[in-house]
Amino acid sequence: MSAGGAVVGPDGLRRCAWGDSADDYRVYHDTEWGRPVHGDDALFERVCLEAFQSGLSWITILRRREGFRSAFAGFEIAKVAEFGADDVERLLGDTGIIRNRAKIEAAIANARVARDLDGGLDTLIWQFAGDPDRPAPRSLDEVPAVTPESTALAKALKKAGFRFVGPTTAYALMQACGLVDDHLADCHARGLRQV
């Protein structure tokens, strides 16, 4: 197998190498990453977390996820859309999250866009689901960072008014939310995606 292939973890399961690099990653990889996520609030959370991750490692976000959920009212779109200047200041002082003004303001603005979106966020995002019959990657080298679908999704999100949603972030969202299955061919979690 080429570099970046699946590895056998201490539990005897073969998984994507990144998914066996830390306990937090192992749980996330095995129980969540690549599984379909539906519902406007659930997808809004993922859009926000992917935006906050930009420029950082995912484990940084994963380890602060509960802090984010608490700070952002459980990522309920209707509640976050009502956040104002006082909430921005509160969030900038919250050590349980990434305190980046541009990203905080984007999350609030994105909630307002999601609240007013015709058809809902779930419908918008899921229309860009990848081909379920696409060949499985055999190594991390075969997993793209951007696809035509993620570029189209980013364009649609930006057209709707969303911020911090470039093609790379959109593809990470697609991977995390099960729009594509990028578990490696010999990973035990491959094929668990059910739309």
Image (cartoon, grey):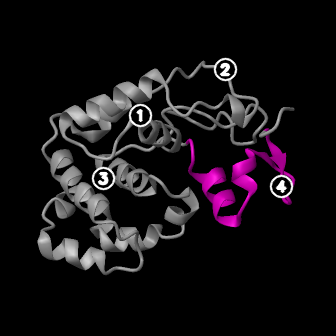
Nearer the N terminus, badge 1 or badge 3?
A: 3
Which of 51/132 is in front?
51
SS at badge 1: helix
Between the C-alphas of marks 2 and 3, the distance is 31 Å
Nearer the N terminus, badge 3 or badge 4?
A: 4
Between the C-alphas of marks 1 and 2, the distance is 21 Å
Say whether residue 134 is left or right of residue 169.
right
Residue 23: x and y, percent? Answer: 70, 65
Q: Is residue 6 magenta?
A: yes
Badge nearest the viewer, 1 or 3: 1
Crowding at dot 3, Cα within 10 Å, few <14 / some 14-19 / many 20+, comes out as: many
Q: Which residue is mark 2?
A: 135
Between the C-alphas of marks 1 and 3, the distance is 21 Å
Name the residue type under label 4.
Gly
Between the C-alphas of marks 2 and 4, the distance is 24 Å
Which image quarter: residue 125?
top left
Q: Which residue is mark 3?
A: 41
Quarter of the figure that contains the N terminus: top right
Q: Which residue is mark 4?
A: 9
Nearer the N terminus, badge 2 or badge 4?
A: 4
